[in-house]
Image (cartoon, helix red, strand yellow):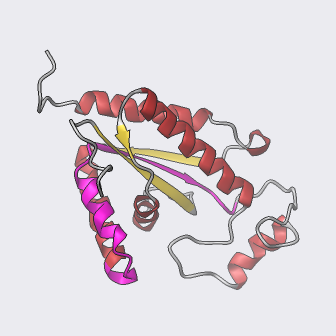
Amino acid sequence: AIEKGMEFSSALLTAAELMAVSARTAPKSKGSDAIEIKVLGPDELEPLAAEMEEIAASSGMKFFLRDAGNIRQSGACVLIGADGLSTLGLNCGACGHATCAEMKASVDIAPVDSLYKGPVCALRSADLGIAVGSAVKTASILNVDNRIMFSAGTAALALGLLPHSTIAFGIPLSVTGKSPYFDR
């Protein structure tokens, strides 16, 4: 029998792994994969939440505090990032530079001290969005409450949890009677 308060941590971690499968197999530009994925279990969430609070204090972005509380209410978190400096050699100009080589060179000339490090290849950014969308689609199919969080991805990058990524999102997961991500 399924009772109120029943522990679903094993099922939640299985859902997170299936989300990671969806992100990994999502279509990528030119079939080139620059996506990085990590699943955090319940015992790994506190450092992420604490880093989100640190970023809130240093940046003044109060929504990081709210989101840190949501991370603490979660049973797992899927982190998905992309190597935004990995280009495809298409010289499309969407990054604001004439060539991919020019974009990569600009990182060394004018590094940006911000939450994400740029510039970023627009196609890699799109790949990240498709991977995140595929992951949350799987969560939806499995009826797992979730929320895409810029804040959790930013904290994951700051902690070095996705060492090959320059842009990332976190997707906290919950299985409770009411989604903690609904009335925020």
Q: Left or right: 37 with respect to 42?
A: right
- The part of the image, by quadrant, that contains residue 15 is top left
Residue 33 in picture, x, y percent from top left: 67, 44
Tell me the magenta residue range.
Answer: 57-85
Residue 163 lies, with reference to residue 80, above or below; the image says below
Q: Left or right: 76 with respect to 18?
A: left
Between residue 73 and residue 38, name the one nearer to us. Answer: 73
Looking at the figure, which quarter contains the N terminus? top left
- The part of the image, by quadrant, that contains residue 67 is bottom left
- Extreme-top residue of the structure: 1
Q: Image point 70% across, 42% down: which residue?
A: 28
Q: Left or right: 164 with respect to 70?
A: right
Residue 32 in picture, x, y percent from top left: 73, 43
Between residue 99 and residue 72, name the one nearer to us. Answer: 72
Reply yes or no: does residue 62 show up in magenta. yes
Q: Image point 71% across, 58% down: which residue?
A: 86
Q: Image point 36% across, 28% down: which residue?
A: 14
Q: Left or right: 150 with respect to 101?
A: left
Q: Image point 59% across, 72% down: which residue?
A: 117
Residue 153 lies, with reference to residue 145, above or below; the image says below
Between residue 147 and residue 11, name the one nearer to us. Answer: 147
Residue 147 in picture, x, y percent from top left: 40, 49
Reply yes or no: does residue 170 show up in magenta. no
Is residue 112 shown to the viewer in this render? yes
Looking at the figure, which quarter contains the C terminus? bottom left
